[in-house]
Image: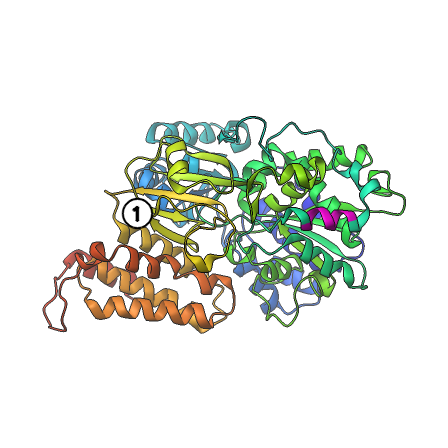
Amino acid sequence: MSSKSSVKKFTVEPARSALLSELWQLQLNEQHISKESIKNLASLHQLSEIEAEGVASFYHFFHQQPAGKHTIYLNNSIISELKGFERIRETFERETGARLGSTDPTGTFGLYATPCIGLSDQEPAALINFYPFTNLNALKVKEIINKLKQGLKAEDICDAPSDNIRYTPANDRTIFFAAYNRGEAIKKLKSLDAEGVLEQLRISELAGRGGAFFPTWKKWDICRSYKDTPKFIVCNADEGEPGTFKDRVLLNNQPGSVLEGMTIAGFTVGASYGIIYLRGEYRWIVKRLEEEIDAFRESGLLGANAGGITGFNFDIRIEIGAGAYVCGEETALLESMEGKRGEPRTKWFYPVEKGYLQLPTVVNNVETFAAVARLIQRGSFEYLKRGIPGSAGTKLISISGDCQRPGIFEIEWGMTVAELLDLCGAEDPYFIQVSGPSGECISIKEKYRRISMLDLMAKKDIRCGGSFMIFNSHRDLVQILMNFSEFFKHESCGVCTPCRAGNFIIQRKLERLKNGLADMNDLKELKSWGTIMKATSRCGLGKTASNSVIQSLDKFNDYFSARFAATDNSTYRKFDHHAAVEEYERYKP
């Protein structure tokens, strides 16, 4: 697996910014990061061993004990869980001899569970040495392990995940998947200049597609106003929200449009350097990205006088994350890029003023940069022909779960939930999770709400950061919420108490509900803890982790009321012997 871009740094970057890449090299070469390696890295970067170990231990994909010659990460997100995770886990354990969370006695295979790997449309799925294997069943798992035992490499037998682009607007109204000609948008910069680009973005009302929907022109204009140099353009490709995979498809299908969007941003704000922070689960896309970056350089679209614009020097490299959902938060991402633990910063400054290396930095996600390139290519007035007033253009949505056609849907803003469910062949939709576990859950009663960027206070339209997970009426909602809760508990950085303690308590309350031990007070406390987390958590992870719990209790009240063992404070409760023994086994010395 090529990693040249992951270790190549710009000359303005300090040595410590290479720490994440150096840890990756150790993990890939030695299957773990030893105490001796930590000591050497600490000495190299003039850090204490405790600080160096603290960075290594923060990230999910770095192991301090050997993780096996063939390291297997089996996705345990809710979609995988409902599609057969347990059956696939049992098969992997039987065929490899490794128990989940450990290696087999020979050290050949390591088997680990991991949150969503961006393949929710092709579950069950796994990564083996960070190469993808999709649509798994018991027979396929057996064949894979036999081939590895025979000496074949994961990279030689892995799958090529389908992009599954299921729908684009008719009559040539697609934005993202229209015919692409490398450099077409960049060539427009000579006639537009920086002010012209900002004007195009302002007219189109293009907003960030990472979920916050902040006006793109405004963010770029603020960064442009700061005089400190150099400036950086960072593409947030840490697409870790379970159920979301649209950025994966863009990077694999249309990487050039993303690179052009970054280059246009660099030209507009006066930046010299661009960095793609790619989630570790997408290492298998690195080669595709590197090839496109090289093609841009050879075409004169990157490097000195990029795009033929005298004095505009701009280049792009790749940084690979190591498995930390919280690094999707922009300041945590910047900390990670600097070779630190990916913990969110206290918001004294926004990245546009003090971002990467405390210098002005624009951080946008993959879809935003691709949208910018297409908008500049076509022009704002053509872009405005799509969508509805106040929500122009199109939106990419990842759809998975109980539907006949999981995959990517490019819709025009203004489409109703009902229309989208019909397009994907939703099967008995009942509980729909929009924008991942941190987003909004809706019931089928809300199917006539439009998908738009309009004011949420009206509670009519629904914003969508990028995904729909569809669950039918036979699914156990408590099982779904427990999966979400486990995810947030695992991914919390642990810095602030509301998130660290709140996610743990919410999970325990849901366990009581699952086991028939809950009463009305437990539901009240679930809401109370959720409210505390939203109000006092340090970053977006803690503020949104309880969204699905709070909303589902309101929207599916009858369902949860039926799960009560009692509605008073009596001492009688249903006793679940299996659950009691399971809890003892979990916490026994």
Magenta span of residues: 196-202
Given residues 87 and 105, the one toward you in this image is 87
Q: Position of residue 456 (x, y in %)?
A: 46, 57
Q: For the point 21% across and 54% down, which residue is it?
A: 559
Q: Position of residue 62 (x, y in %)?
A: 53, 53
Identify the image quadrant of residue 149: top left
Residue type, mark 1 in image: Lys
Given residues 86 and 379, the one toward you in this image is 379
Position of 50 relative to 308 (above/below) = below
Magenta span main SS: helix
- Secondary structure of residue under mark 1: helix
Q: For the point 60% across and 56% down, which residue is it?
A: 214
Position of 216 relative to 93 (above/below) = below
Residue underneath mark 1: 445
Given residues 96 and 175, the one toward you in this image is 175
Is residue 201 covered in magenta?
Answer: yes
| 296 horizontally vs 576: left or right | right
Q: Residues within 10 Å of mark 1 (few under 14, many from 20)?
A: few
| 377 horizontally vs 247: left or right | right
Q: For the point 45% across and 71% down, which residue is it?
A: 535
Q: For the point 47% across and 67% down, which residue is it?
A: 494
Q: Position of residue 326 (x, y in %)?
A: 52, 58
